[in-house]
Amino acid sequence: MHKRILIPICVLILCYLAGCAANPAAAKLDEEKRIGVVLTEAGLGDQELNDLAIEGLTKARDRLNIIYTYKEVTADMSYEKALQELASEGMNIIITLEAEAGEAVAEQAKANPDITYISFGTDLKAKNLYGYQFHTEEAGYLAGVTAATITKSGKTGFIGESDSPYLTGFKKGIENTNSDTELLVRETSPDDQRAGNELSKELLKEGADVLFADPGKAGKAMIAQAALAHVYAIGAGGDQAYLEPDAVVTSAMLRVDHVIFELLKLNDKGEDLPSDTNVGLEEQGVELSPIAVVSITDKVAGKVHTATQKLIESERAK
């Protein structure tokens, strides 16, 4: 009789233990927030926005209760398609990184009210949609402070779009640091590598010895030309010292990695995401990378620090 009772009990115990082994993992997976990000056409390995976004998500994965996946925009993968696929894969939060995604994000947010959307480069707002714009003008300003401090010829150069916030800030930073410094500007698309090469040569020929540009292929070409001419360049987007360590003094960075982590941390705590669409120095959304040229570090670092504090105080006063 004891044997007849023992066998069913053993079976029950084994089933219970098997359930205990499986259920916590399943429960944990259910508890984890699923985050999807749509990378720009530059794709992984750009050493700029996309790579920084993945760094921020990886940090969040390691420290918070999230898992993440990504889609890359290509000729065959539009923003609309990428966003639809992420929604169908059960994402709780979907992130885009540039203004070009704005229209598709707005449509998808309406279609999927239970998903939270974070759209960088836009000021979109809805119940489940949060747009954030980087104060790139502030990063450009600090680049201008740097350029005006280190130029020996008294001439600096910029390559990019005429309405670029990087240029707006760069100009102000130069004027407020040394009004005698001349700024030479050449307009082109940030993605035009050939123009970047040719326009850099023009600026160098005119005597510019510190060059700055919008992020993109033209900017990378500018850095290469600066290195060949043995003059300084200032990177943009991500830390571009890896391109030409001896030429790139610093880079005007958009810290999308930091901002993504901080937003996901708020969400993890159950707190509302910020309603302010602007992300700047105070939020650690933009900054200059550490001065990479040892011989001028002391000369530049103090002025950049002072300028940073003044910009933050100015923003707080608004």
Image: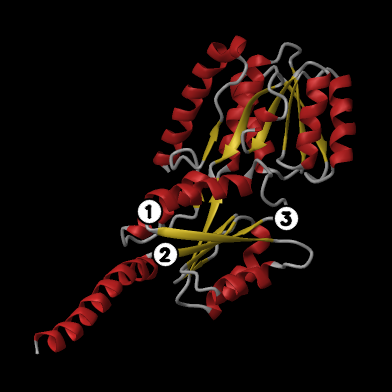
Q: Label 3 is placed on what type of residue?
A: Glu
**Whether residue 59 is situated above or below residue 127 in the rendered picture:** above
Q: Is residue 191 left or right of residue 315?
A: right
Residue 191 in the image, given as x and y percentages of width and height:
80, 46
Circle 3 residue: 41
**Whether residue 294 is situated above or below residue 126 in the rendered picture:** above
Mark before the other along the chain sequence, 1 or 2 = 2
Residue 298 in the image, given as x and y percentages of width and height:
53, 12
Circle 1 residue: 64
Identify which residue, 223 or 145, lies in the foreground. Answer: 223
Q: Nearer the viewer, mark 1 or mark 3?
A: 1
Q: Are marks 1 and 2 in contact (CB under 8 Å)?
A: yes
Circle 2 residue: 33
Q: Residue at x 14, y 85 (%)?
A: 3
Identify which residue, 75 or 313, lies in the foreground. Answer: 75
Q: Label 2 is placed on what type of residue?
A: Lys
Residue 288 in the image, given as x and y percentages of width and height:
56, 30
Q: Residue at x 44, y 35 (%)?
A: 312
Residue 279 visible, this orientation: no
